[in-house]
Amino acid sequence: MTTSSRFVDIHLLQTIPYANLNRDDLGSPKSLTYGGVNRTRVSSQCWKRATRQALEDQLPDKAIRTRKVVVEVAERLCKEGWPRELADYAARQLLVAAGAKRSKSKKSNGEDEGLSLENSGYTSVLLFLPESSLDGLAALARRERGALERAYASGKEQKPPFTQEEVRNLLIGRTGTIALFGRMLAELPDGKVDGAVQVAHAFTTHATDTEVDFFTAVDDKLSSDETGSGHMNSAEFSAGVFYRYATVNVRDLIDNLDDDAAVARGLTERFLSAFATAMPSGKRTATAPHTLPDLAYIAVRSDRPVSLAAAFERPVRAGWEAGGLAEPSRQQLADYASVLHEMWGTDGIAYHGHVSIDSKPFDSLGNKLSSFRELVIAAVDTAFRDRG
């Protein structure tokens, strides 16, 4: 068994009751066909967003994804007493200094050509940047207020009084969540960050059917001779045991953080905890689907990430004796891991362990620990053992 580690894989089994965490364009729970049967699915983007938001609550410098950089900077300036028109002008000039075009243009093949500003002040693409960068941009405007006032008063198009480098450095700044999840920003040089985390779409370990819930709303101000409802509609829901999987590339995360292994370690711990406990917000006020995983299995690997999704290509069926799908799902995951380890060996596994609601351990999933916190610490200790 090797001690050189690069990947931290986390596998979760989580029972979700009647819910609709992630809808398609028609309002139905997202789905997929796998193993010849229909399953309920929650997209990776959906659970990543919930995880990122949970992480942001724990980090000092939050990241935001927005097209409203101009609007946000102008609001900051207005709160300092700047006239609205001057604040809007200054915020636009900041983006122009970074290379944004003043009106949206297209290449001859119809593709967007670089970063541009729409008439509304919105950027042509979503920018993913530290929230503190908005304060930094406002500080640049404050520094050059005199030049901005003169340029605005002239009524002529003027070169912005900022250097391209100082504005771009703020726009392409990084936070912990940007280092983890990455950033697609081809419009600005050096703006792209390859994410260190990969997240799979969650899906039920078994076949599911969508349930249609017909509901009405009563008009509280109906007169005594009026009957009926004030509103009628229907919504779709499902329930099931979900297999969830994500992996952290430790080496890439350290690279994204300029070789700061200590910060990378803390982020890895926080990510594993946030991923396990975060819950998408879809229909939550109507369903309150706030469960926690029944089983968590973490493996630290030196070779490559390994998903155990194929454990459920054959859909789980309810147990003959006690019924239910959660217990046989946990057993099916452990059985699949066992045959996979026998077939391919375990040389690539530096550490693995699990926690579950079962009293018995699953030997194929490594040591059984008493708490998820212990599991995370043991895994992260191994992953960062030789990294300072």
Image (spheres, grey):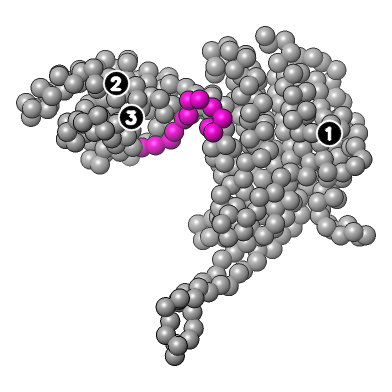
Which mark lies nearer to you, 3 or 2? 2
> Eyeballing the image, is 342 above or below 4?
below
Question: Quadrant of residue 367 in the image?
Answer: top right
Question: Quadrant of residue 5 in the image?
Answer: top right
Residue 188 image position (x, y, % from top left):
37, 24
Residue located beneath label 1 in the image: 370
Quarter placement of the C terminus: top right
Residue 43 image position (x, y, % from top left):
59, 46
CA gap between label 1 and label 3 equals 52 Å
Badge 2 element: helix
Residue 94 image position (x, y, % from top left):
26, 25
Asked if disc 3 and disc 2 are in contact, CB closer than 8 Å, the reply is no
Residue located beneath label 3 in the image: 114
Residue placed at 54% from the left, 24% from the top?
A: 176
Which mark lies nearer to you, 1 or 3? 1
Q: Which residues are magenta?
A: 56-67
Circle 2 packing at 10 Å, graded few (<14), some (14-19), many (20+), is some
CA gap between label 1 and label 2 equals 50 Å
Q: Is residue 69 left or right of residue 44?
A: left
Q: Is residue 132 left or right of residue 294?
A: left
> Eyeballing the image, is 283 above or below 345?
below
On the question of residue 343 being in view, the answer is: no
Badge 3 element: loop
Which amino acid type corresponds to the residue marked 1 in the rendered image?
Ser
CA gap between label 3 and label 2 equals 25 Å
Assess whether residue 286 is covered by the magenta stretch: no
15 and 3: which one is in front? Answer: 15
Assess whether residue 57 is covered by the magenta stretch: yes
Question: Quadrant of residue 181 in the image?
Answer: top right
Exactly how many numbered labels are in the figure?
3
Residue placed at 70% from the left, 49% from the top?
A: 291
